[in-house]
Image (spheres, helix red, strand yellow):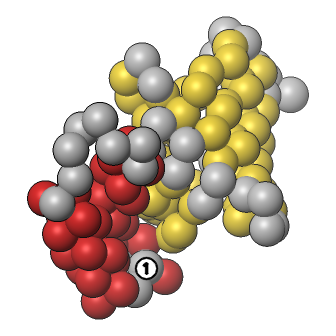
Amino acid sequence: MADELLLELVTPEKLAFSDKVEEVTVPGSEGEFGVLRGHASLLSSIQIGELSFTKDNKKTYYAVNTGYAEVLSGKVTILVESAERADFIDRDRARKDKEEAEARLNKMAKEDPEYDQVKAALTMAETRLKVAEKA
């Protein structure tokens, strides 16, 4: 099994992707990391960012929200709050979300209880825009 790498990308709503891939790049909370076949086992939290994988020499990109990754020698399981494939991202909606989050942040103090939540929404909107450019 170590000669294959199965990737499963799971959100609360659905199994977003499940297939064999050549490699996966994950936005870990301690920094981005890559996984190839036979990788050492690990668990990592995931931060908002760009997840990518290569299948049949073609790279596919997703904008992912926070979650967890489990890496085994032949399988990578990604559990995230949301995952949007680059070619399915609504750029107009992402721009609007970014503008709204920026406007809300400009009116908030860092001590505001909702500050971190709005900051995360801004980061996710920016990530979605960045990933959409790769479609």
Query: Picture quarter containing residue 131?
Result: bottom left
Tell me what residue is drawn at x 65 percent, y 48 percent: 80
View extreme (left): residue: 106
Give the vertical position of 93 relative to 2 (above or below): below
Which of the pair 123/17 is nearer the observer? 123
Percent x, y of residue 26 = 49, 36
Give the vertical position of 110 relative to 118 (above or below): above
Percent x, y of residue 126 = 26, 61
Percent x, y of residue 89 = 43, 79
Query: Picture quarter containing residue 6?
Result: top right
* Residue 124 seen by the camera: no
Quadrant that contains the C terminus: bottom left
Tell me what residue is drawn at x 13 percent, y 59 percent: 106
Residue at mark 1: 89
**Horizontal arrangement in the rendering, residue 59 relative to residue 35 (left or right):** left
Tell me what residue is drawn at x 57 percent, y 55 percent: 55
* Residue 12 seen by the camera: yes
Tell me what residue is drawn at x 42 percent, y 43 percent: 113
Circle 1 SS class: loop
**Horizontal arrangement in the rendering, residue 90 relative to residue 1 (left or right):** left
Q: Amino acid at mark 1?
A: Ile
Percent x, y of residue 103 = 17, 69
Quadrant that contains the N terminus: top right
